């Protein structure tokens, strides 16, 4: 692993801040996290205060390696070991029965804990130097679009978060896949880049969606990951007509398209491949949001397996909007 002196100093400062019970902005391969010492209740309380997040929502604990699993979880099923071996470090969070030392301040009082080893060199260096788990939700204010660059994190929190490690643009761009292994049948609680088929290839059949007995997942709230501008999903063939109808009514509509923007529309064009699209999605939503339009028209991707997680995030991004027509 490359060790640049700038990063070495920055990492030392970040680890010292974490030891003092302060928060840092931490890059991961999915989205940036707002990290605190997971064993320090008052440090973790600062995450909830800064994000404006309800305190009963549980946090993911980030680890340096899978060997640390047994410090945080008990009754580890074989599926946990297999998935950790197959996908860690990587964009997969496992929900497991919590070890006794894991406080209610992490789990929101639930008997389970979410654990993940992120696949980002800076995050792994911080975690290794810190030597224990870091609680980190996405580094955005509650309900807002997750940050995928250090600049996004600074824009969210400004001077309230003096240390933000810059690890470049997140490579995955959407939050980790969450698999609940705390009940008899493994269950996908949040889709992500690692898809259901890939999980099933390792551990056999799983189910999807929250059960009545499932732990609470804030990312599963209907309106989440949302831009401020009212947004709606629209099939490609209707994008231009809707944009023009809004313009005729004196309203500014911006388009977020897959591939080229339709002629005579304004907005952003994203890659046609799911992974490339996901990597740029949140940055594009932030850019479009900053233009203070009346409405975002988001091209609704076709129903293909590789777009499942993107469709999930887009649905949530528009859920809080009333129809802009
Ligand atoms: O990719 C990610 O997962 C990013 C990066 C920073 O690691 N983190 C992230 O954290 O998305 P957050 O807090 O924004 O979303 C984590 C989700 C939440 O919906 C939370 O409710 C859920 O994980 N979660 C955490 N612990 C849980 C538990 N014990 N049971 C059920 N859900 C849990
Ligand atoms: Mg989040």
Image (cartoon, rainbow, N blue to C red):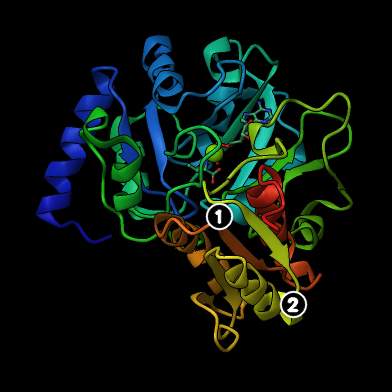
Residue 145 in the image: above or below residue 255: above
Residue 59 appears at what percent x and percent y?
Answer: 55, 27
Residue farthest bottom in this picture: 263
Residue 30 in the image: above or below residue 259: above
Quadrant in the rendering for residue 240: bottom right
What separation in Å lies between label 1 and label 2 (alpha carbons)? 26 Å
How many numbered marks, from 0 up?
A: 2
Q: Nearer the viewer, mark 1 or mark 2?
A: 2
- The answer to whether residue 252 is left or right of residue 215 is left
Q: Does label 1 point to a residue whose CB lies under 8 Å from ligand 1?
A: yes
For this rendering, which residue is in front, 134 or 263?
263
Residue at the (86%, 23%) spot, across then down: 213
Q: Which residue is mark 1?
A: 174
**In what element is the residue under mark 2?**
helix
Residue 176 appears at what percent x and percent y?
Answer: 59, 49
Is residue 82 something one can see in this rendering? no
Residue 235 in the image: above or below residue 174: below
**In what element is the residue under mark 1?**
loop
Image region (quadrant) for ligand 1: top right
Q: Which residue is mark 2?
A: 238
Q: Quadrant of the N terminus?
A: bottom left
Residue at the (26%, 51%) spot, across then down: 166
Is residue 243 something one can see in this rendering? yes
Residue at the (29%, 17%) spot, across then down: 21
For this rendering, which residue is in front, 66 or 308?
308
Residue at the (63%, 60%) spot, across then down: 193
């Amino acid at each position: 692993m490359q060790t640049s002196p700038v990063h070495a100093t920055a990492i030392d400062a970040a680890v010292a801040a974490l030891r003092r019970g302060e928060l840092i902005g931490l890059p991961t391969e999915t989205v940036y996290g707002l990290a605190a010492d997971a064993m320090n209740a008052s440090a973790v309380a600062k995450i909830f205060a800064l994000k404006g997040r309800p305190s009963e929502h549980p946090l993911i604990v980030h680890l340096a390696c899978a060997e640390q699993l047994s410090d945080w979880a008990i009754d580890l099923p074989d599926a946990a070991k297999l998935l950790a071996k197959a996908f860690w470090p990587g964009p997969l969070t496992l929900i497991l029965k919590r070890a006794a030392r894991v406080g209610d301040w992490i789990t929101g009082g639930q008997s389970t804990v979410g654990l993940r080893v992120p696949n980002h060199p800076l995050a792994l260096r911080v975690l290794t130097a810190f030597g224990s788990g870091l609680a980190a939700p996405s580094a955005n204010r509650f309900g807002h679009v997750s940050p995928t660059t250090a600049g996004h994190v600074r824009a969210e929190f400004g001077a309230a978060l003096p240390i933000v490690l810059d690890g470049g643009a997140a490579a995955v761009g959407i939050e980790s896949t969450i698999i609940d292994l705390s009940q008899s049948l493994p269950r996908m609680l949040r889709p992500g880049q690692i898809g259901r088929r890939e999980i099933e290839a390792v551990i056999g059949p799983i189910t999807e969606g929250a059960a009545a007995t499932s732990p609470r997942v804030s990312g599963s709230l209907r309106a989440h990951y949302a831009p401020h501008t009212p947004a709606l999903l629209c099939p490609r063939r209707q994008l231009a007509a809707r944009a023009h109808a809004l313009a005729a009514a004196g309203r500014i509509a911006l388009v977020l398209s897959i591939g080229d923007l339709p002629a005579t529309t304004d907005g952003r064009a994203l890659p046609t491949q799911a992974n490339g699209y996901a990597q740029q999605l949140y940055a594009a939503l932030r850019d479009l949001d900053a233009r203070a339009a009346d409405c975002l028209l988001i091209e609704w991707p076709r129903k293909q397996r590789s777009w499942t997680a993107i469709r999930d995030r887009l649905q949530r991004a528009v859920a809080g909007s009333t129809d802009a027509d």
